[in-house]
Amino acid sequence: PLGVTFRDVVFGYGGRLEGRSPAHRGVTFEVPAGGLTALVGPSGAGKSTVFALLERFYEHDAGTVAVGGRDIRHWPLAELRSAIAYVEQDAPVLAGTLRENLLLAAPDATEEEVRRAVSRTRLDGLVERLPGGLDAQVGHRGVTLSGGERQRIAIARALLRRPRLLLLDEVTSQLDAVNEEALREVVVELAAETTVLAIAHRLSTVVRADRIVVMEDGRVRAVGRHADLLRSD
Ligand code: ADP
Ligand code: ADP
């Protein structure tokens, strides 16, 4: 797994000269390799921008972003992006079978890896229930899946890329309490094997994180464990 370092990162989407308040105004935090780190803060705080900079969709204007201890400007881009997997909020299930959906970004994954990704994301029950199992149609005109199932398919799909850094964007926010709790368990287990950096809106959803980075208005306001942050607020 790869750790992440942001040091004094400044970044504005419109470029520095357009007079907008930059999305990052000196962002500094450290994500150790392995474990679950949550990024929280109000909408517009700069959380998604952390992900966008990590994948080098944009170049930061100042400061340092490092992945695995190496400045991302020194990573070959394809190598950097293949080390990172991103799961978006409301990840789509695409037309096709469950297997096709899982192998979308990892066509070379073995049967054993597919089985393992399925079990780590608690999709075994679904596979057993579906006529045709992994080869059942789940996308377009296929079976209807719950929000939690769709989100777990997206995570399994990301796992099959063997990420060394897994970025999760609000993966539990649209779910009911039962599905949310189940998904939280899955995420905590994954953090035992890879570095997980997860965006969340509410502090209550990140009780299980090893570390929480609180952002506000383009800066890091606090870093700590859940209990520490509740005390200091
Ligand atoms: P969060 O994920 O915490 O909601 P973002 O990182 O998405 O915050 O946004 C930080 C700031 O950057 C906000 O002011 C937002 O409006 C702005 N921003 C985000 N994405 C873009 C973009 N693609 N172009 C211009 N401004 C953007
Ligand atoms: P919002 O989150 O504001 O509703 P979108 O749903 O359109 O906006 O998502 C855009 C955000 O998602 C961008 O800020 C971008 O940084 C992030 N994003 C999109 N694709 C990726 C990706 N592959 N990896 C990391 N971040 C991504």
Image: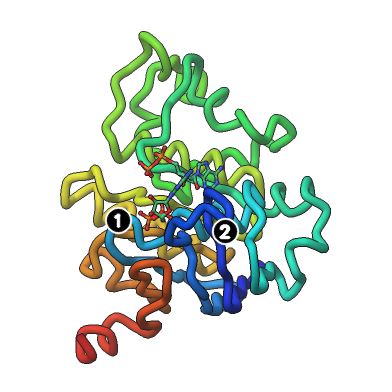
What's the residue type where badge 2 is placed? Arg
Q: Locate residue 8, reporting x and y percent.
A: 58, 78
Q: Locate residue 151, reporting x and y percent.
A: 38, 40
Which quadrant would residue 141 be assigned to in this image? Answer: top left
Mark 1 Cβ inside 8 Å of ligand 1: yes
Q: Is residue 116 visible?
A: no
Q: Locate residue 143, reporting x and y percent.
A: 33, 17
Residue drawn at 70 percent across, 54 percent down: 83
Q: Locate residue 225, reporting x and y percent.
A: 35, 83
Residue 129 against residue 2 in the figure, above or below: above
What number is the disc on residue 16? 2
Task: Check disc 1 and report the residue beneath it.
Answer: 43
What number is the disc on residue 230? none
Residue at the farthest top position: 141
Mark nearer the viewer, 2 or 1: 2
Q: Looking at the image, which is closer to me, 30 or 104?
A: 30
